[in-house]
């Protein structure tokens, strides 16, 4: 991917304003909950953090995002607190009456870290929810303990916050490809040097996780020192790509197995136990640069890829190649611009989302492939597509399913081209009538019909 964020206008498509107005009118029907949060500065990444508190009608949860500024103030990594409304609690009036120019009362900034450069990607460590990794326009990966980092004021001339650890080894900028393993404290990165690098941060995580108050005081004090952050080199360098590595992902159950995609149109599977050469190299996985990849946590044979050819493809790692090139199980073609992010749903094994420069976040179910979905007198939807989130008015650069709150997504768009700057953060949950089994939905609707008829007869 040579450049990110170049929106494409398709002939015959409705304008952004027309599409958005139509979508907004349908919000009370399509969504169980939606919160719209206007951002002064764009954010290229958004991630759910740990759940903080549970209550009767809503839960409190950490949320990570960034502020990509124009240089008048520093770039920042933002730690926010988000109140997530529970299913079937929000009223239709509430979710439909929001102001695009306002900030949602459900999202509150908790802490600001002054980041050395733009935050291109954020990833959280599953084994320790206060540890976050970030990528910027440099060869290094930065590791942050968000609990011990002091809250900073992002004013002009303010010094950068000091990372708790720096992961070194790339020979050129590593801007986007970043992952943390669900099964071990391992970090994976890819960059313009065409390499994939693997680090273990086990020892460092153990040292900063000591519970004593003296340890915490020492950690906090160290941030004011001018000495360099501690750093560690990679435990493995993996070479097989012929162009920039754009995204990486671990196998959900094994930190020694991982995959990567890049601007060479290749998907590569790696096994660190077998050495530094590709275990499987899928040439021409797409017809253009590959931007993103995700590995199914429910079925480890299935891997998703997204590309500048506007498609999402699903590969079975047992048989990903045919006649020397990529042979996907299925091609999902519903976007009209480059796909920037794909992620499997944690709540159903066959469901995943994809976000693109066309401003849509599509939700797919590969079990619905081949089953026609569409309104009467309208063309059928793309095969497998069952929900389309159209609340963003420009390219959707990132999204993340919430593992604590089923079917809830946070998504962020860079609105620079369509609205004159800034970005939009949205937290939303589609109506469960959309994804629940058809027989359940019909039975529930029948109860409503019976209730309405009985009320009319009184």
Image (cartoon, grey):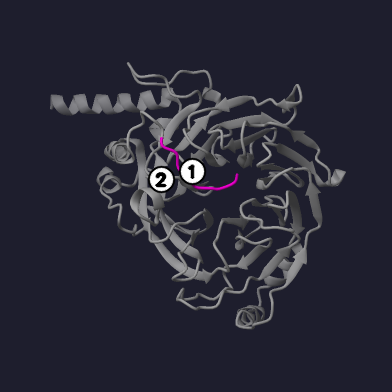
Residue at point 39% right, 19% down?
A: 379
The spot of residue 389 in percent (x, y) is: 41, 38
Q: Nearer the viewer, residue 75 or 113?
A: 75
- Label 1 packing within 10 angstroms: few (<14), some (14-19), many (20+): some
Q: Which element is circle 2 on?
A: loop
277 to 123, vertically: above or below: above
The spot of residue 164 in percent (x, y) is: 66, 71
Residue 16 forms part of the magenta stretch: no
CA separation in Å, label 1 and label 2: 26 Å
Range covered by the magenta-colored residues: 1-9
Residue at point 54% right, 36% down?
A: 352
337 to 39, vertically: above or below: above
Residue at point 75% right, 28% down?
A: 318
Residue bearing the label numbered 1: 406
Q: Which mark is residue 382?
A: none
The spot of residue 415 in percent (x, y) is: 40, 51
- Label 2 packing within 10 angstroms: few (<14), some (14-19), many (20+): many
Position of residue 99 in the picture relative to residue 162 (left or right): left
């Amino acid at each position: 991917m040579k450049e990110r964020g170049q929106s494409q206008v398709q002939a015959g498509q409705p304008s952004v304003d027309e599409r958005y107005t139509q979508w907004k009118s349908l919000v009370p029907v399509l969504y169980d909950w939606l919160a719209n949060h206007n951002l002064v500065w764009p954010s290229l990444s958004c991630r759910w953090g740990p759940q903080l508190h549970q209550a009767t009608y809503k839960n409190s949860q950490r949320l990570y995002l960034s502020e990509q500024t124009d240089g008048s103030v520093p770039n920042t990594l933002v730690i926010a607190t988000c109140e997530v409304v529970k299913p079937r609690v929000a009223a239709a009036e509430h979710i439909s009456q929001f102001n695009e120019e306002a900030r949602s009362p459900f999202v509150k900034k908790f802490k600001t870290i002054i980041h050395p450069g733009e935050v291109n990607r954020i990833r959280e460590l599953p084994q320790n929810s206060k540890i976050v990794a970030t990528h910027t326009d440099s060869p290094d990966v930065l590791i942050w303990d968000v609990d011990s980092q002091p809250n900073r004021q992002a004013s002009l001339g303010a010094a950068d916050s000091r990372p708790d650890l720096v992961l070194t080894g790339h020979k050129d900028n590593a801007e986007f490809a970043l992952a943390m393993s669900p099964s071990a404290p391992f970090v994976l990165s890819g960059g313009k040097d065409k390499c994939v690098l693997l680090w273990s941060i086990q020892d460092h995580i153990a040292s900063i996780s000591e519970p004593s108050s003296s340890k915490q005081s020492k950690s906090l004090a160290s941030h004011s020192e001018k000495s360099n952050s501690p750093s560690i080199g990679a435990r493995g360098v993996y070479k097989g790509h012929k162009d920039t590595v754009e995204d990486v992902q671990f196998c959900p159950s094994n930190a020694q197995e991982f995959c990567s995609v890049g601007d060479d149109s290749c998907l590569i599977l790696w096994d660190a136990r077998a050495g530094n050469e590709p275990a499987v190299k899928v040439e021409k996985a797409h017809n253009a640069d590959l931007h993103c990849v995700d590995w199914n946590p429910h079925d480890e044979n299935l891997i998703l890829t997204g590309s500048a050819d506007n498609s999402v493809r699903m590969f079975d790692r047992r048989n990903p190649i045919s006649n020397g090139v990529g042979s996907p199980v299925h091609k999902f073609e519903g976007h009209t611009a480059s796909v920037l992010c794909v992620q499997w749903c944690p709540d159903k094994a066959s469901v995943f989302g994809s976000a693109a420069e066309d401003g849509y976040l599509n939700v797919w179910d590969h079990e619905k492939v081949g089953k026609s979905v569409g309104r009467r007198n309208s063309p059928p939807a793309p095969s497998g597509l069952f929900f389309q989130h159209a609340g963003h008015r420009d390219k959707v650069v990132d999204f993340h399913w919430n593992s604590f709150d089923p079917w809830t997504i946070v998504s962020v768009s860079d609105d620079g081209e369509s609205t004159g700057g800034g970005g939009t953060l949205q937290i939303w949950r589609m109506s469960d009538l959309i994804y629940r089994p058809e027989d359940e939905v019909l039975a529930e609707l029948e109860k409503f019909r019976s209730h309405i008829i009985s009320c009319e007869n009184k």
